[in-house]
Image (spheres, rainbow, N blue to C red):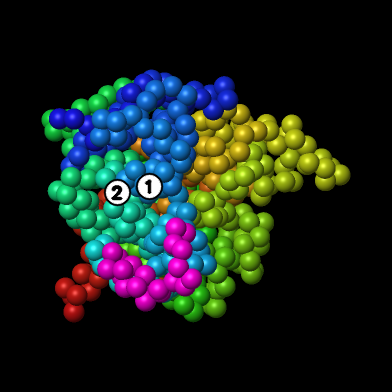
Amino acid sequence: MSALLELKGISKRFGASRALSGVDFSLHAGEIHALCGENGAGKSTLMNIIDGIHRPDEGEILLNGQKVVIDGPAHAMRLGIGLVHQEIALCADATVAENIFMPEINAGKAAWMNYASFNERAAKVLRRLGQDIDPATPVGDLSISSQQLVEIAKALTLDCKVLILDEPTAALTDNESAALFRVLHDLKAQGIGIIYISHRMAEIFTHCDRVTVLRDGRNVHCGPLAGSTPDELVRRMVGRDLGNYYPPKQSASPTSESSGPVLEVNDIADGERVHGVSFALKRGEILGIAGLMGAGRSELAETICGLRIAKRGAVRLNGKTLTIRKYSDALRAGIAYLSEDRKAAGVFLDLPIAQNVSSMALGRVSSAWGLLQRSAEHKLAKTLGAKLNLKSDGVAIEVSSLSGGNQQKVAIAKLLATNPSVLLMDEPTRGVDVGAKSEIHHILRELANQGVGVIVISSELPEIIGLCDRALVIRDGQVAGEVEANEMTEEALLRLASGLCEQETA
């Protein structure tokens, strides 16, 4: 079978760093081809070369057997190549319809725009994804998951022959993901070639036909997924066995003196999405917060740390009632929050790693007279970067040059620099490869063992089950139930999240 898209001997350097070394890749019409590898393996660089964002230093690209030189994303679009980036890149002030048809609007020469037509066409493509989002809504008013679906809808309007999806389900609910995969299989049946980048093994083995694995900028495997296993794929990605993917859970009894509450939340509410939530976080435990998308999990964390105004309730840290009016109050008290939106609220993309890491802990890297000491700043960044196994060419490079997973590590290092007593981690491993996920899990357990209170909000139930000592399930802004480690199953968590337990007892 001749390839729809073929890359031969692709190499790319960024300064002294070699991102790709002689990579070969092929995509057939009517296949879903998984591209796997750890963060920093070269996946994003390879996709950016296909999309014309970067030019390869060596090698060639063939489309339908013809050699092409792709001059940029607009040229790639004209050639029938569509790329949905992992990081959402929409115009927040424009409407959903305007974002979806932005390329068409930019290319148009009419004196005015037919908004009614754009809205009607946008609604049609969104319905294809199982969504009833109002096309006239400004994108900035949408949730992260809805913004991701708008990105995907935008790609579906391009009439592309090659569709590249980079972690498309990272912010989606199970129902939204199922709708997306129905569309992808329809596109596959129409002969469109799909490159699917994901760290989710279940998705890869359920929906993809072949897999290419990159490691350290080289192609280390290409072949059919049939007959392979997730463990084999992970070994090819990381070049080693991960051993214990999740660290051992809390060894001390939850009722022991050493595991007394480090954080107590009593009847907290924001008057909008959070309605009277109470819980205690024990010292030395990792508490999971589960629930369906839109249940109020993130809003709960934001209310605790002052990013949303609490209308009632109290927060106590180590037995002391806190007055939290804004995030800086929480940070000074020892409560740090990792946002689920890394690009908008996690890191400063245009600043170096060192400045990102020190940005909330300037006192640690300043002299007694308040003067910033760059040597201390670099030392702090190097120390925390090594702890998180951050892959970079030094702490002086901009965060925008890092892979998504390494950007996430910088966001976590930024919190650790504040020496927090409590960490609120909202989707801490979203967009992170399996090796880095395991590293982050072990770091969170190490912090918990040192007495830091750790709360993990995650849409991935296996992560809640594998990592957490206990889980709260949030539904409609309230606690639907609590599940101990020995009772944690996906079924138990989903029944509470969906309200099935209440329906059965009614």
Quadrant of the drawing holding the N terminus: top left
Which residue type does callout 2 highlight?
Cys
Q: Residue at x 33, y 54 (%)?
A: 158
Quadrant of the drawing holding the C terminus: bottom left
Asked if residue 238 is positioned above or below residue 286 in the image, the reply reads above
Crowd tier of the residue under label 1, counting other residues whose Cα lies within 10 Å: few below 14, some 14–19, many 20 or above: many
Instruction: Please indicate whether residue 8 sits to the left or right of residue 495 in the image.
Output: right
The spot of residue 446 in percent (x, y) is 48, 39
On the image, numbered disc 2 is attached to which residue? 160
On the image, numbered disc 1 is attached to which residue? 77
Q: Is residue 66 magenta?
A: no
Instruction: Please indicate whether residue 263 sits to the left or right of residue 131 in the image.
Output: right
Q: Residue at x 56, y 62 (%)?
A: 305
The spot of residue 127 in percent (x, y) is 26, 67
Instruction: Please indicate whether residue 32 sits to the left or right of residue 376 in the image.
Output: left
Q: Nearer the viewer, residue 415 or 181?
A: 181
Q: Residue at x 74, y 40 (%)?
A: 365
Magenta-tinted stretch: 106-126
Q: Is residue 124 magenta?
A: yes
Which residue type does callout 1 highlight?
Met
Prevalent SS, magenta region: helix
Looking at the rendered structure, the secondary structure element under dot 2 is loop
